[in-house]
Amino acid sequence: MLFPGALAEVSIFDAADKWCDEGYALVRYRFPGLDGRPLHPPLKIAEAAGEVATFLRQFSGKTTRLLGYSTGGAIALTTAALVGGDLRVALMSCAVEAGGGIQTGLRGALDIAGAATRAGSLSRRAIWLEYYKTLLFGRHGRTSPQAVALIKERLDRIVMPEGDLPRAHTDDLRRWRLPDARRLPPAAQMRLFVGLEDPVFSLDQSRAMAARLGGAAVTGYAGQGHLLFLTEPAVFDDILAFFEDREPPAGTKGLSSG
């Protein structure tokens, strides 16, 4: 079960299509206003998790693997508290409790203000494209040639924060709290995959959440920001290895910590 995040289409998981060759059946959750889903009603994390849990109960006895990106990680964790069985949960650039609160909000506001200054424009599109560079590789990597090239390559595929779309995707996240740890899988069956330069949810925030999950492991990727699905395709190989409880492929760039 694949859960994208705010302003993210299900295509962010295209690299997981090859998992079908390993016997997996992929199901993608769609966010409001994207991938053909109506914008209203807005996302409610508990309701989304309830719907997914009901769907998964049709396949009780089957192996279940949940992969959530950013806000989708909150849905994945909430779903995990509702279903049992053979379950593992991978959390990529996962949203933290209450969306990080004031700490994350302040960092984001400063980053966007800086992006507006660098863009030299008050156009939402121009500011977002400049901020996207920070999302790719963090504050230190936003001027890299690779960031500029990726922006040009993906220009027609970047979802813009227009109209009610951001609010429909993120308002409920501000109220989200971690499920009771007693209802979640053991820590060994959950893992966070994070960019060490993530400007949205910091490494300290991710480690704190991992600790609250009972000591779930964290795999970090040096030089990477929030958009791991785009900048570090090898993350999908590492996630598959975690799902199958085996060592990641040789040469992985992930740095694990317990």
Image (cartoon, helix red, strand yellow):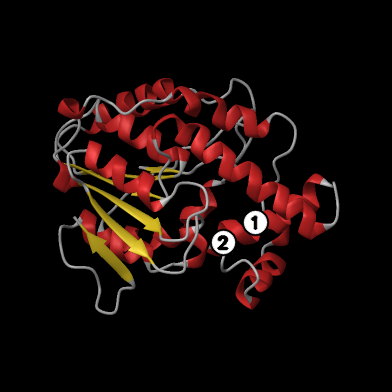
| Residue 43 vertical placement versus 132 (above, below) | above
Is residue 92 something one can see in this rendering? yes
| Label 2 with label 1: CB-CB less than 8 Å | yes
Q: Which mark is residue 46?
A: none
| Residue 111 vertical placement versus 151 (above, below) | above
Mark 1, other Cα within 10 Å: few <14 / some 14–19 / many ≥20 = many
Horizontal placement of 100 versus 53: left or right? right
Q: Nearer the viewer, residue 186 or 109?
A: 109
Where does label 2 land, which residue?
136
| Residue 13 vertical placement versus 253 (above, below) | above
Q: Nearer the viewer, residue 257 or 26?
A: 257
Q: Which mark is residue 132?
A: 1
Residue 11 image offset from top left, x and y in percent: 53, 53
Quadrant in which the C terminus is drawn: bottom left
Res 58 → quadrant? top left
Q: Nearer the viewer, residue 150 or 29?
A: 150
What type is the residue that disc 1 sits on?
Answer: Tyr
Residue 31 image offset from top left, x and y in percent: 54, 35
Residue 40 image offset from top left, x and y in percent: 63, 22
Q: Residue at x 38, y 69 (%)?
A: 234
